[in-house]
Image (tube, helix red, strand yellow):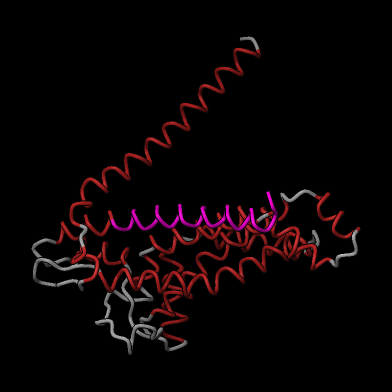
């Protein structure tokens, strides 16, 4: 086989594999939306769930999902980016750095249920926070830190060295170069990391079952921002309805909740990418 023909076959095979991956994703989205899109209406979005009657909604679960997302990102983004900046810009290649990278890789490969049991032992039991929003958020922070650290490190490493040297040659300090040149150039990939972490937070259920709980009180102005209250999320609600739902329309609620979760994640991705383009254009003038 000639090298030219081999190259064409390899390219064709890669196109086929990429198309299969996209088709697989589109099939999942289509099946979920087709099953649950008709369930979604105003009453479904704002009303609380009903344990033994038909017609329940997912209003508290939607609010809890966004609250835990916001709370988790508050801890995940600065800690993960800080660790990524250190590994990319300051860490020397020695045994300590190697152990640190190995620890991050090991932590990223742990199953979420193990992280959930860790959160149950540390945040729920030892710290005494109980099944609460803060216990769930801290557990998801542990779950997402390796991802955020690794993406930040790789994004900063990919910034051209010429930009760093030009900034330093103009008299900027190392920290000014990192914050005003390197990180600005890496904004698109950093936002991608935040989007990936957010999607994982929205869709995570196993870790939250052990930490944030499977119940949610009636939300009022007095307890809405209380981070020590139980906070069942949309993903946990889907699992609970499918596993032990007693309502006559449990299947309908599960289908509608799954479709709603997909819509929220897709909308969040488009919104984040749109804001990223505007922010990058404003900071760089590109």
Residue at point 88% right, 60% down?
168
* Secondary structure mainly formed by the magenta segment: helix
The answer to which quarter of the image holds residue 128 is: bottom left
Q: Position of residue 171 (x, y in %)?
A: 90, 64
Specify whether 40 is left or right of 162. left
The answer to if 206 sits in the magenta stretch is: no
The answer to if 274 sits in the magenta stretch is: yes
Q: Closest to the observer: 214 or 268?
A: 268
Residue 140 sits above or below residue 41 on the image: below
Specify whether 228 is left or right of 41. right
Q: Position of residue 133 (x, y in %)?
A: 39, 79
Residue at point 44% right, 69% down?
69
Q: Residue extending furthest top? A: 1
Q: Position of residue 237 (x, y in %)?
A: 27, 66
Residue at point 44% right, 80% down?
134
Specify whether 93 is left or right of 196. right
The answer to which quarter of the image holds residue 30 is: top left
């Amino acid at each position: 086989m000639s090298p030219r023909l081999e190259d064409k076959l390899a390219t064709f095979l890669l196109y086929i594999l990429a198309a299969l991956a996209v088709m697989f994703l589109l099939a999942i989205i289509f099946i979920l939306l087709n099953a649950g899109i008709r369930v979604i209406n105003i009453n479904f979005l704002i009303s609380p769930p009903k344990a033994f009657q038909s017609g329940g909604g997912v209003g508290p679960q939607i609010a809890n999902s966004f609250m835990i997302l916001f709370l988790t990102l508050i801890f995940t983004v600065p800690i993960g980016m800080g660790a990524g900046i250190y590994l990319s810009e300051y860490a020397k290649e020695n045994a300590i750095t190697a152990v640190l990278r190995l620890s991050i890789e090991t932590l990223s490969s742990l199953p979420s249920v193990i992280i959930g049991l860790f959160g149950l032992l540390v945040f729920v039991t030892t710290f005494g926070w109980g099944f609460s929003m803060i216990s769930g958020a801290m557990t998801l922070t542990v779950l997402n830190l390796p991802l955020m650290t690794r993406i930040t490190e790789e994004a900063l490493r990919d910034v051209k060295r010429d930009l760093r040297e030009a900034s330093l040659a103009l008299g900027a300090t190392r920290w000014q170069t990192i914050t005003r040149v390197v990180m600005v150039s890496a904004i698109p990939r950093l936002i991608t990391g935040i989007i990936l972490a957010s999607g994982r937070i929205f869709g995570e259920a196993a870790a939250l079952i052990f930490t944030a709980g499977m119940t949610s009180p009636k939300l009022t102005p007095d307890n809405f921002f209380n981070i020590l209250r139980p906070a069942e999320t949309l993903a946990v609600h889907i699992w609970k309805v499918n596993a032990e739902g007693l309502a006559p329309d449990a299947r309908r609620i599960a289908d509608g909740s799954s479709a709603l979760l997909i819509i929220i994640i897709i909308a969040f991705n488009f919104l984040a990418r749109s804001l990223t383009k505007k922010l990058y254009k404003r900071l760089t003038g590109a």
